[in-house]
Image (cartoon, rainbow, N blue to C red):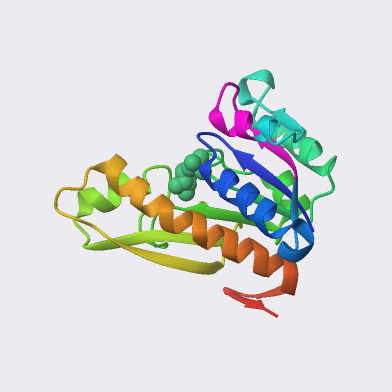
């Protein structure tokens, strides 16, 4: 299976996928990353892709007349690589109607909180501020909402009294990377069905 990964930052989730595929081999894992896209330049996620010898592309909103044009451009850029699955790993833009029409049901996102709690761009900070004692991460299919799609898997992370946002986020990312690698491999190898809010992996 062909994966296109979308990043906006450090790309450690991307790196976890690349490392696992290198370790087990694409055949065994069931998928290979064929391209990496971003919404901005100069991020470590793109450098990781380049170090792995992968094609990359950048679609910046400000380079287009508006969100619709950006969404159309991103859709075409991703479609050029004919992905079976699109993995949004720390991609910090909301995917638009055209993208969802083209790839809906095949877009996996990872979020650093236990959805439906704490959706949006500050899930780690919001969980900490709320005072929950456990938080975690969620791997889910993307639908037309923000972090509202059918949930595939979740991992729990205890919050410690001494935690600040970055310490907690780092601990969440350790769980998140393992969860994403495991889920993407299973989806690619076994195939899956989405039945309403349930995901059935064969
Ligand atoms: C991940 O925790 C992701 O869930 C969140 O941003 C982080 C991205 O980390 N949206 P990285 O770029 O994969 O290191």
The C terminus, quarter of image: bottom right
Q: Residue at x 79, y 62 (%)?
A: 27
The N terminus, quarter of image: bottom right
How many marks are shown on the rendered structure? Answer: 0
Q: Residue at x 85, y 40 (%)?
A: 80
Q: Which residues are magenta?
A: 34-48
Does the magenta-highlighted stretch encompass residue 42? yes
Residue 70 appears at what percent x and percent y?
A: 69, 30
Q: Residue furthest left?
A: 161
Residue 176 appears at what percent x and percent y?
A: 46, 56
Q: Classify residue 172 as left or right of residue 3.
A: left
Q: Classify residue 180 as left or right of residue 3.
A: left
Q: Is 148 or 55 nearer to us in this picture?
A: 55
- Residue 148 visible here: no
Does the magenta-highlighted stretch encompass residue 98? no
Identify the image quadrant of residue 6.
top right
Q: Classify residue 163 as left or right of residue 193.
A: left
In the displayed structure, 134 sits above or below 118; it is below
In the displayed structure, 104 sits above or below 187; it is above
Q: Residue at x 28, y 53 (%)?
A: 127
Residue 17 appears at what percent x and percent y?
A: 62, 51
Residue 139 appears at what percent x and percent y?
A: 53, 61
């Amino acid at each position: 299976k062909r994966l296109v990964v979308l990043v906006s930052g450090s790309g450690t989730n991307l790196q976890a996928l690349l490392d696992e595929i290198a370790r087990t081999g694409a055949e065994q894992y069931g998928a290979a990353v064929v391209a990496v896209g971003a919404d901005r330049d100069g991020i470590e996620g793109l450098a990781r892709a380049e170090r792995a010898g992968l094609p990359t592309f950048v679609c910046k909103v400000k380079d287009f007349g508006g969100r619709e044009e950006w969404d159309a451009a991103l859709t075409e850029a991703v479609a050029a690589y004919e992905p079976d699955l699109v993995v949004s790993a720390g991609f910090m833009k909301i995917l638009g109607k055209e993208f969802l029409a083209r790839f809906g049901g095949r877009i996996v996102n990872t979020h650093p909180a236990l959805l439906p709690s704490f959706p949006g761009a500050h899930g780690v900070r919001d969980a900490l501020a709320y005072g929950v004692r456990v938080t975690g991460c969620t791997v889910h299919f993307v639908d037309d909402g923000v972090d509202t799609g059918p949930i595939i898997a979740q991992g729990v992370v205890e919050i410690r009294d001494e935690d600040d946002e970055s310490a907690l986020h780092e601990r969440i990312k350790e769980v998140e990377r393992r969860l994403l690698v495991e889920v993407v491999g299973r989806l690619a190898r076994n195939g899956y069905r989405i039945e309403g809010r349930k995901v059935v992996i064969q």
